[in-house]
Image (cartoon, helix red, strand yellow):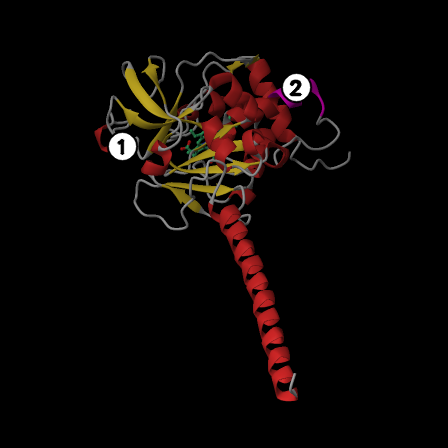
Amino acid sequence: MPRRWFGAVVLAVVASLTLVVLGGLRAWAFDGALIRVDQGARARTGLNLREKRGSALDLEVGGDLAGVPAGSVRYLSREDLEALPQVSYMVTDDANFSGPVQVRGVELGILAREFAAGGEKALVVALCGDLYRAHYSQAYVLAHRPLLVLEINGAGPSGWPKSKGASSMGPYLISHSHFTPSFRIFAHDEEAQIPWGVVRLEFRSEEAVFGGIAPRGPSAGDAGVQAGFRIARENCLRCHGPSSFGRLKGQINWAGIAFFADASPSEFTAYMRNPRSVAPSAQMPGNPEYDDPTTRALIAYFETFIAKKKP
Ligand code: HEC
């Protein structure tokens, strides 16, 4: 082979090898991008979480979402939610409705499985436009199968009955086919968590959220303190929380409640039973059924957040 031909052949071989290697690299990079897209934008059924809100009726989702960086906010449109398995039934015992209604929607358990980093173990938190919130542990979801309602009597949110205070109950509300309390602590029956005006669902870890308000100090394990903890997390946590939760419906935070409970237990008890007996313009709902053991348990729990001076 003449020398110049040899040089040309070597060049051609090197060039084609380079192309093969580059092609391989490109394919590898492309695969990488695909995997990232997969994890970034898709959850378990391949339903896309949207990066941008497309409508006021979109459901915002956040917290620990599967496959997206912590703290990300994503959206599901009504059509996205319609594409998930639907459940439909007649509701007769939901205090938000004045009579029986037919509802259709998606179970929170399905949403956790699809979108939560923790899957079905996740604590689902429903946040409302007025800063009210409802917490659904895995145990609650299994016992009561809460439903994110998309349709009432065949109609979307604009055709829904109004709340007792005449507000619109959209864009989402949560209901159950029926609700039977699965536990009772003193005079506190497990409460149906039935928020309306739900604008966002958050997926969290139960340990992280409930751990953040676990009783402190040497009496933390006392039966009364633990009972108070359980009641507070079902009831008070819907509107109050530690300051780290940010702005909530009840502006006084956990430390403020603890201070009140410790400083004047009898006034605190009166407030819990009937807020208007203490503050005539109070908006907080009363708990007239709370007997002495119940209020004592709540006080014992909140007092664990007070740093007592040593005698
Ligand atoms: C549905 C929402 C809601 C729930 C549930 C709730 N609160 Fe409240 N709470 C409020 C609001 C709103 C206020 C502000 C004053 C008002 O309107 O009553 C308030 C005020 C208070 C205050 C009075 C603070 C002050 O300014 O003197 C205390 C104490 C309190 N709440 C304790 C509790 C405890 C303890 C529980 C659980 C047993 C609880 N709250 C459950 C909404 C709620």
Q: Residue at x 49, y 27 (%)?
A: 109
| Magenta-colored span | 221-227
Kindly identify which residue carries mark 1.
Answer: 168
Residue 85 rendering spot, x and y as whole percentages: 40, 27
Looking at the image, is 137 positioned above or below residue 77?
Answer: above
Are there few (<14), some (14-19), or many (20+) residues within 10 Å of tag 1?
A: some
Residue 184 rendering spot, x and y as whole percentages: 55, 12
At mark 2, the secondary structure is helix
Q: Between residue 141 and residue 279, name the one nearer to us.
A: 141
Q: Earlier in the sequence, mark 1 or mark 2?
A: 1
Q: Work out whether residue 156 can be spotted.
A: yes
Q: Residue at x 61, y 69 (%)?
A: 17
* Quarter of image, res 224: top right
Kindly identify which residue carries mark 2.
Answer: 224
The residue mark sitting in front, 1 or 2, is 1
Type of the residue with mark 2? Gly
Q: Quadrant of the N terminus?
A: bottom right
At mark 1, the secondary structure is loop
Which of the labelled discs sits on residue 38, or is there none?
none
Label 1 CB sits under 8 Å from any ligand 1 atom: no
Left or right of 71 in this view: 154: left
Residue 22 rendering spot, x and y as whole percentages: 57, 67
Q: Between residue 205 and residue 68, name the one nearer to us.
A: 68
Type of the residue with mark 1? Ser
